[in-house]
Amino acid sequence: MWYGMDLLIDTYGTFIGATGERITLSMPGPLPPVPKGRTRRPKDALTNRTRIKKEYPIRRLDKIVILRPSSISMHAVELALEHEEDIVA
């Protein structure tokens, strides 16, 4: 088993949440492709982005380092405090 992993968040717009005993990250995915016959994406392309989700067990984390502007839920903060994990922004 490995313990003491640092979770680095270096993607703008990441949402940090918690599910049970896991920290969940929801990051913006790639933009949709440009439609055929057009030179630009539609104006709503940014709102139609897919999200990439990843989960990490809280017991294997040592600290959470936030390098870019992100959102963090209250449940994630409470979970980190319960397990004495550091959140560094």
Image (cartoon, helix red, strand yellow):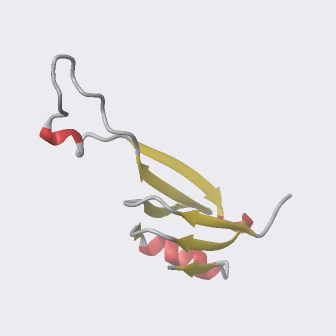
Indicate the quadrant where residue 59 lies.
bottom right
Instruction: Give the left or right position of residue 27, taking residue 83 as reference.
Output: left
Instruction: Give the left or right position of residue 82, taking residue 16 as reference.
Output: right
| Residue 43, horizontal then vertical, whole percent | 13, 41
Q: How many marks?
A: 0
For the residue pair 3 and 66, the one nearer the viewer reads as: 66
Q: Which residue lies furthest to the right in this view?
A: 1
Indicate the quadrant where residue 74 lies.
bottom left
Looking at the image, residue 76 lies above or below residue 13: below
Q: Quadrant of the N terminus?
A: bottom right
Q: Which residue is drawn at 40% across and 43% down?
A: 29
Q: Residue at x 30, y 33 (%)?
A: 32
Q: Residue at x 80, y 66 (%)?
A: 3
Q: Which residue is drawn at 30% across and 28% down?
A: 33
Q: Residue furthest top?
A: 37
Instruction: Give the left or right position of residue 14, taking residue 18 as reference.
Output: left
| Residue 37, horizontal then vertical, whole percent | 16, 17
Q: Residue furthest front?
A: 39
| Residue 4, horizontal then vertical, whole percent | 77, 70
Indicate the quadrant where residue 70 lies.
bottom left
| Residue 35, horizontal then vertical, whole percent | 21, 23
For the residue pair 62 and 10, the one nearer the viewer reads as: 10
Instruction: Give the left or right position of residue 6, taking residue 39 as reference.
Output: right
Looking at the image, residue 81 lies above or below residue 54: below
